[in-house]
Image (tube, rainbow, N blue to C red):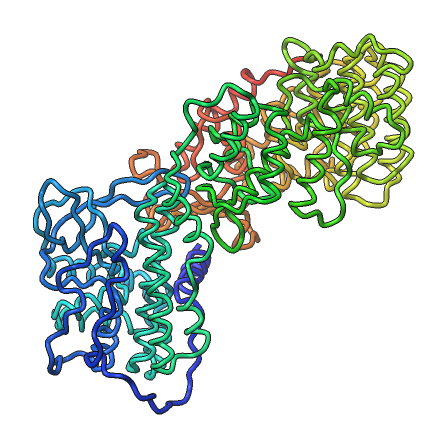
Amino acid sequence: MMRRRAFRLALLALAACGPASVPSPRLTEPPREAPEDAPPPPWPFADTILPAPPAQGKPTKPGPRLGLPEDLVRAVETLFRSGVADPRGLPYHEVSITLTTQPEGPGEVVATKGFVLPGPEHEPRFGVLWNGLVYPLVSVGPAADLYADIEALRANDKRICDQQAAHFPDMPCIRTRAPRPELPSHRLEEILPMHAAILVQLGQDTLARSVWESWIKGGDLDAVPEIAGRERDIFARLAEHFLHGLRDRGFWAHVRGDDALALASLRGLGRLSPALSARAAVLGASEQTVNTLAEPPGPLLVDQEKRAARKAPKGLPSPLPTDPAARAAALVAALGEVHEPAFGRSGAQAQVLEDPILQALLAEGEAAVLPLAEALANDERSTRSIWYEAHGIELLTVRDVAELALDTLAVDFPLAPAPPNETKTQKAARFKQAAETYKSIPADERWFRDLADETAGPARWVQAAMRIVGPTDAPRQRPDASDFLALFVRVDGPPKPRFAGLVSRKNPSVTELLAQRMKQLTAMKSPAHLRTSCEMGLLLALWDPKGAARPLREGTAPLRKAWKDHEDPSAAEELAPCLAVLFVARGASGDERSFDEYASWIRAIDPATVPPKAGTLRTLLAPLALRPTRPSIVAAGRAMFAPKTSPWAVRFRRGERDDLLDPALLPIPGMRELVLAALEDRSAVGTIELDAYGEVEWGRDGAGEFDREHEQVDPRDPGAAPSSTKMPLRACDHVAEGLARRIGSAAPFRMYWIEPRRDDAIAALRAFVVTKSEPPRAP
């Protein structure tokens, strides 16, 4: 456990340090203009809601600053003359501001400390916070104690360093070198360079020296004296931290809809970035540093300027026009107000589609396609929706959300095939073409034509079949095998098809077309086509259970042979769950012998070839649980799970098939006995360790650092073992934890409990296995 915790701390420390500084030879300082020789620049936020502090631009008191590095003093003077908010002469108070505390949430009022600008009580108040930025204040509280706050900051820094020293006794304490986001930068929680800069500007030399010396100790600043004592590097560090906080504030103010603060921040950034970058260049900073400081606000400032000019309403427009075309156009015009987040452009986007504006557009259906296609082609506005990728958090554009909406509406449009590396403009053109082509053709007829079209190809065949057969509440994304299984075991039976009116269609019928496509796709033999062939059979069983019996029986054998003969193991893994559901579908069509075929097939599957994906094993073994008393199923279940030497039982006892603990699988013959025996096994297989920081970690002997599991210990739990305790991990503990995690509160189990408490929980789990498990409903 100590190695794992040490490794995590090391990662955090490296992430905090940012890129390592490379020692460079001492260079002669370039000639500098004395800051006091030129008048201060205008307040960079002059045309915004943010007022200038009274001391802004006024010279500092001349003379030496005892105990402070001269280069630090000069760097701070230059920074504040350039536009960092000057707190001199302002009272220090408890205040509250609005911040984005959760990336997906609205702004929240948070308490902090700041230097309050003068102003009438009945008008908005403003204050300078510890990141050097002026903020609108929600409230002003009582006076705060600057000295006490700095002492608390230093005490917290010491506590953090002591924790690091406990794990890395030979390493110096490493402070945060990288700029911090807005949320932690405005308050005194960890020592940051802007804290020292503000104390220098206030004339609090003793406090400034203590904070600065703490921050430069350890890591690159301590190891490279040039960085610790050279004005150019001190200035560059301070400017980088300040500009990062300003940029971050503008971004999150935009996300939460605070356009006045976003515009002020981005305008100020557009003026301060070139000014601070130019000053860094004069001081001799590297080209990389100069370019980093010069980074402009980008498209978000342009977007904010346009919002300020047109004063559009926020949120869902109300009232909406009664004409469908005008209503869709109004909703597309409002896409800049979409605020629900997305999680990767190619990942799970369901949440952003829940935004009220997008929901209203999707409800418009075909009327929204053309205006959305136009937005996809040309609308570069930003939304308020964030999306996550490996490199960070960014904003979705209107083009992005228009594309998501069109992809969702595409379920009603047989689109032409996409070209390789399709651009958004090309995609918009495909949607426009489809909207014009099918505007006078009913939806059911569109899809029937595609299913009957020999030239349409596999992708459009399966799309058409999904839309014809799929129920009205079917998911818009392509279902997997577990989705199909859920349809066949529904309590009220399989749902009615969406376009049931096509049942009377003859020569060819939908049944004939689905059977024909299933056969054609199997003959294509590629992994994707084999899976699609299987899915076509499942759709046939949903569409026409009686008429599906013979085509499914004839189509199963070629699919089984293709599964057995395929050289690509991943292809067989993808096909196996669908084949299992195909046997269930045949049973739903009245062919009970399909379960006998399944029993002989499933016994031959090596558990090593079954991927540990969520739901895969449940789907693959579902027929065993659906017919637990059928003789062939009983024989198969007992052959697979009863013998101690069977591959399934061996892997389960080694902890390699924890997915067998799914309660839905307990009715399988032999499964209940396998689990009950495992819950009786008290042999030690690993260790359980509770640390001194409220975390428990466990793993089997020989497990790697990242194969061990952990969770927080509830300090209120009377059954918890004492901290810094090491206990044996028993086989029954491992099984009990996995089973309890899957059944929830019915029989809880915590690995950090003392052994008698764990034994009581294991007894309750045994009772659950014996009495509470129920098989899925048979079709």
Q: Which residue is at a point 88% across and 38% down the rendered structure image?
A: 525
The C terminus, quarter of image: top right
Residue 234 point in image, percent of width and height = 30, 75
Residue 716 location, quadrant = top left
Pick whichever, 638 or 144, lies toward us: 144
Q: Is residue 520 left or right of residue 749?
A: right
Q: Which residue is at a point 83% across and 13% down the rendered structure image?
A: 591
Q: Is residue 526 left or right of residue 220?
A: right
Residue 61 point in image, percent of width and height = 10, 76
Q: Is residue 275 left or right of residue 687?
A: left
Residue 438 in view of the camera: yes
Residue 53 location, quadrant = bottom left
Q: Which residue is at a point 52% across and 41% down the rendered structure image?
A: 398
The N terminus, quarter of image: bottom left
Residue 139 point in image, percent of width and height = 16, 42
Above or below 642: residue 122:
below
Pick whichever, 8 or 37, lies toward us: 37
Q: How many marks?
A: 0
Pick whichever, 384 or 687, lies toward us: 384
Above or below 140: residue 773:
above
Residue 714 point in image, percent of width and height = 34, 38
